[in-house]
């Protein structure tokens, strides 16, 4: 089992057996997959640009990962946590200046043309590096891609780049799209962005805005006997309550990405024929974080930040806000990460008396109204849980004499207020840990980031020692030395508290019993579903 | 006929100014809302400074507000609604795809609330103060007081989840390839719940109005004359009282159309109907200003046309109105 805590509630929900069985696929689980059938599932948002090479986000992957494949996928039991997809092997040079990929033979694009190393070179140089939201950072030093033959692609970097980072980035950042489709005209305006052409087990069928996306089986798929399903239909259900109703009415068979709200899980787990599954999202961990504006003089004092950390009862948050479907956090790397996590960091136990003492020590005494000072608190509106934690934090701060005024915005307004205008004192954010701290985690505390960059340090925090550590780790090639640097990084963040990590959580799936091979990899909901099947 | 034409001409001239105010007002309101389309977009993707700058440039958001408004109005003059940034498709196409669904929902719900409401109003008003009068008045008020989304959810739980008589939402069976009458029947089945949810809310309005109107007409001299003539009660109610009480309801019909459009936002979300209301909600959330302007413009035109039709109908139903309009 991974480090992700499984709560008593989940066990009570009667899915313990299932959790155990999905954790170990293959041997001992002699269920033969059935062929055919249409899987109907809930979609709560409608991404228009379906090109995962340009938009590497879970909303896009949820649909397009079945159509467009990456070089490698995350895996529970593969070496370095990876399983081959379009690449069969990957090898980094000792000098960090090149990575060699051996590609799968006999793969065809959905339009019948063969897949070759030229497609990989094109995707990497023309799309990942210049256009992709995450690739622009990770592949910034990619200089060229050599293609000595059709099945070999050699990435050449201008500056030494840690192979560990490239490897960890493969599942999310390496979607390969066909060169022959994209080399004509502007890549951003290519019609294939809305009707993707890939190598995956399913072909893009149609999209009816506001209604559904239809994917159909790719009969020429490289995987033996795969895929099992004939069709996948994503039914657009915008209302928070409709996914649960649709499951109960047997109109859909699956609701992933917590489309069924946590509060409904207890009830829905008792409905015969439905199962609640909290596995299959280990690679998509969200972190509940208190973002701090260090421009406020009170918050620039580390004692005040420590006091806030002591005022938060993390166990209570996990139990109440997340109904047990989460784990408490100790620092900027989640506990369930197999490579980088360390528990050896300063921790802040829930202790209101200590928090009050720290604030007194810092010189912020309670005034006539019993308050020390007041702050603006902006909870991110993207998740129910971030909003609820905002309500909790307000109360927790009141207990230590800090008067927090909640400011609720919609998504666009929140992004602007926090990351461009810096019009916040505290904010509640849900950054994503993407398997390597260098992808989207160090940016949360690093200094020198221009205004307006979302999910980055916009709190005006500057710590030279931490900056130096991040810079050193980014050019350290040796995997174990690099890992150690990130452990030190976690320690430094937990000591100086540029932000406060409260909890880590991921999503829940609810499915009919008839859906087979669910949650069999750490990024299941955004993987290719070639082996997913329907009984009956 | 000339009476109607004069009316149409006057209204069209007036409408242009109304539309201009609507467009400029909506544009300024949206500009005042914090965050733009790029802010809304990067919520789900993140991205560095260079990517954000690139997006702002591509979507024309690096131009000043005035330039964008002027460009929009200039394009509008050529009947071009522009390009949606979130859909990357012409806004006209996006709206035309959704408009029929909303119209179908609105027309059916209006027919339900107007038809059933006035019929029940006549039934109740025929015997003011009777048990059925009180029962219907209180019952309909209770429905009027219920929030639309709650009524929708209850209908879903009862008829779609528990009884499984009707689908939980959508406009038709997904990817079913039905055609002709089959498809029409399929759509009717899917719309049964949303139309009921939307229609029942406004039912009370027509019922109460009809009933009140009837109570007033009862006291008129011509009713006394009709009774003295020896007409049956039934004939008095239908031909004399109800017909005269119906006139204010027609006015209400026009006014109500705007409300219905607002109500459909909620109902379309609850029942996953791909209509204009839901599109508007998405456009606001994604700060897709031109798309929202297109939707508001379409809705405004819709409301103006409906009210025009109501006025024309009125002119025919009540000759006094047309005469004064044309003569003024």
Image: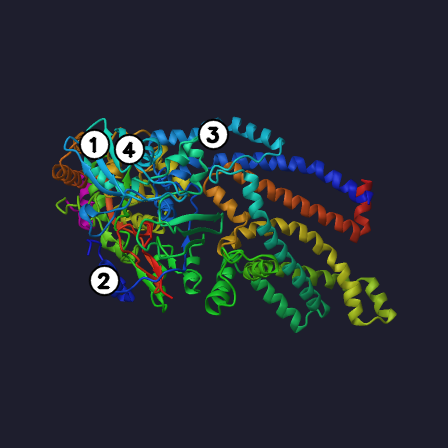
Q: Are marks 2 and 1 in contact (CB under 8 Å)?
A: no
| Structural distance between the alpha carbons of marks 4 and 3 | 25 Å
Percent x, y for residue B240?
Answer: 80, 63
Q: Quadrant of the C terminus of chain A?
A: bottom left
Q: Are marks 4 and 1 on the same chain?
A: yes
The reply to whether residue A330 is visible in this rendering is no
Which element is circle 1 on? strand
| CA neighbours of label 3 inside 10 A, class few (<14), some (14 to 19), many (20+) | few
Q: Residue at x 19, y 34 (%)?
A: A162
Q: Are marks 3 and 1 in contact (CB under 8 Å)?
A: no
What residue does disc 2 label?
Answer: A20
Question: In front of the other: label 2 or label 1?
Answer: 1
Magenta highlight range: A346-363
State the mark number for residue A137: 4
Q: Are marks 4 and 1 in contact (CB under 8 Å)?
A: no
| CA neighbours of label 4 inside 10 A, class few (<14), some (14 to 19), many (20+) | some
Q: Are marks 4 and 3 in contact (CB under 8 Å)?
A: no
Question: In front of the other: label 3 or label 1?
Answer: 1
């Amino acid at each position: 089992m991974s480090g992700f805590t499984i709560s008593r509630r989940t066990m009570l929900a009667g899915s313990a057996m299932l959790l155990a069985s999905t954790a170990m696929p293959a041997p001992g689980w002699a269920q033969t997959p059935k062929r055919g059938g249409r899987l109907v599932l809930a979609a709560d948002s409608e991404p228009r640009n379906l090109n995962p090479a340009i938009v590497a986000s879970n909303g896009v992957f949820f649909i397009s990962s079945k159509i467009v494949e990456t070089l490698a996928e995350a895996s529970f039991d593969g070496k370095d946590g990876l399983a081959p997809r379009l690449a069969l092997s990957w090898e980094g040079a000792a000098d960090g200046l090149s990575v060699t990929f051996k590609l799968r033979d006999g793969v065809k694009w959905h339009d019948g043309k063969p897949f070759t190393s030229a497609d990989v070179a094109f995707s990497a140089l023309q799309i990942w590096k210049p256009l992709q939201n995450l690739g622009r950072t990770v592949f910034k030093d990619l200089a060229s891609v050599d293609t000595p033959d059709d099945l070999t692609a050699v990435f050449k970097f201008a500056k030494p780049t840690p192979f560990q980072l490239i490897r960890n980035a493969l599942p999310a950042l390496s979607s390969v799209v066909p060169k022959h489709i994209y080399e004509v005209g502007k890549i951003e305006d290519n019609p294939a962005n809305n009707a993707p052409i890939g190598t995956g087990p399913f072909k893009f069928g149609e999209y009816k805005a506001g209604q559904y996306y239809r994917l159909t089986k790719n009969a020429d798929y490289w995987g033996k006997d795969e895929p099992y399903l004939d069709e996948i239909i994503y039914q657009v259900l915008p209302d928070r309550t409709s996914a649960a109703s649709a499951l109960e009415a047997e109109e859909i068979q699956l609701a992933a990405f917590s489309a069924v709200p946590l509060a409904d899980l207890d009830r829905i787990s008792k409905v015969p024929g439905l199962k609640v599954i909290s596995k299959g999202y280990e690679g998509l961990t969200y972190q509940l974080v208190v973002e701090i504006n260090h421009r406020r003089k009170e918050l620039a004092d580390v004692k005040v930040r420590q006091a806030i950390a002591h005022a938060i009862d993390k166990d209570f948050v996990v139990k109440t806000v997340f109904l047990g479907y989460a784990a408490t956090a100790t620092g900027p790397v989640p506990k369930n990460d197999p490579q980088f996590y360390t528990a050896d960091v300063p921790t802040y136990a829930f202790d209101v008396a200590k928090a009050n003492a720290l604030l007194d020590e810092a010189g912020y005494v309670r005034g006539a109204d019993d308050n020390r000072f007041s702050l603006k608190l902006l909870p991110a509106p993207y998740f129910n849980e971030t909003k609820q934690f905002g309500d909790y934090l307000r109360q927790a701060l009141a207990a230590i004499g800090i008067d927090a005024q909640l400011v609720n915005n919609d998504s666009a307004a929140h992004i602007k207020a926090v990351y461009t205008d810096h019009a916040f004192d505290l904010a509640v954010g849900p950054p994503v840990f993407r398997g390597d701290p260098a992808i989207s985690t160090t940016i949360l505390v690093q200094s020198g980031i221009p205004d307006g960059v979302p999910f980055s340090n916009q709190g005006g925090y500057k710590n030279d020692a931490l900056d130096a550590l991040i810079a050193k780790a980014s050019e350290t090639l040796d995997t174990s030395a690099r890992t150690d640097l990130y452990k030190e990084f976690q320690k430094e963040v937990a000591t100086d508290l540029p932000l406060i990590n409260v909890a880590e959580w991921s999503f829940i799936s609810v499915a009919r019993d008839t859906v087979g091979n669910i949650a069999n990899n750490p990024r299941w909901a955004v993987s290719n579903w070639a082996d997913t099947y329907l009984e009956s | 006929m000339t009476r109607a034409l004069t009316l149409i001409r006057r209204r069209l001239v007036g409408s242009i100014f109304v539309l201009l105010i609507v467009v400029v007002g909506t544009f300024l309101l949206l500009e005042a809302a914090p965050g733009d389309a790029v802010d809304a977009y990067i919520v789900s993707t993140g991205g560095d400074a260079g990517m954000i700058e690139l997006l702002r440039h591509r979507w024309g958001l690096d131009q000043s507000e005035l330039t964008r408004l002027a460009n929009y109005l200039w394009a509008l003059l050529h009947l071009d609604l522009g390009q949606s940034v979130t859909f990357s498709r012409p806004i006209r196409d996006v709206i035309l795809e959704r408009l029929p669904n909303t119209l179908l929902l609105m027309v059916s719900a209006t027919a339900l609330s107007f038809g059933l409401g006035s019929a029940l109003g006549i039934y109740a008003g025929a015997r003011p103060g009777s048990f059925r009068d009180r029962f219907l008045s209180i019952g309909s008020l209770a429905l009027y007081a219920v929030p639309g989304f709650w009524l929708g959810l209850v209908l879903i739980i009862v008829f779609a989840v528990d009884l499984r008589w009707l689908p939980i939402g959508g406009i038709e069976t997904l990817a079913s390839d039905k055609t002709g009458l089959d498809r029409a029947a399929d759509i009717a089945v899917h719309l049964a719940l949303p139309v009921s949810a939307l229609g029942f809310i406004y039912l009370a309005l027509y019922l109460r109005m009809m009933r009140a109107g009837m109570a007033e007409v009862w006291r008129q001299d011509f009713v006394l004359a009709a009774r003295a003539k020896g007409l049956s009660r039934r004939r008095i109610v239908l031909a004399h009282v109800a017909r005269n009480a119906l006139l204010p309801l027609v006015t209400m019909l026009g006014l109500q159309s705007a409300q219905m459009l607002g109500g459909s936002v909620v109902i379309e979300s609850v029942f996953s109907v791909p209509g204009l209301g839901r599109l508007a909600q998405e456009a606001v959330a994604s700060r897709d200003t031109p798309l929202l302007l297109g939707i508001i413009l379409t809705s405004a035109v819709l409301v103006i046309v409906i009210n025009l039709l109501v006025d024309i109908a009125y002119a025919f139903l009540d000759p006094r109105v047309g005469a004064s309009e044309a003569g003024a």
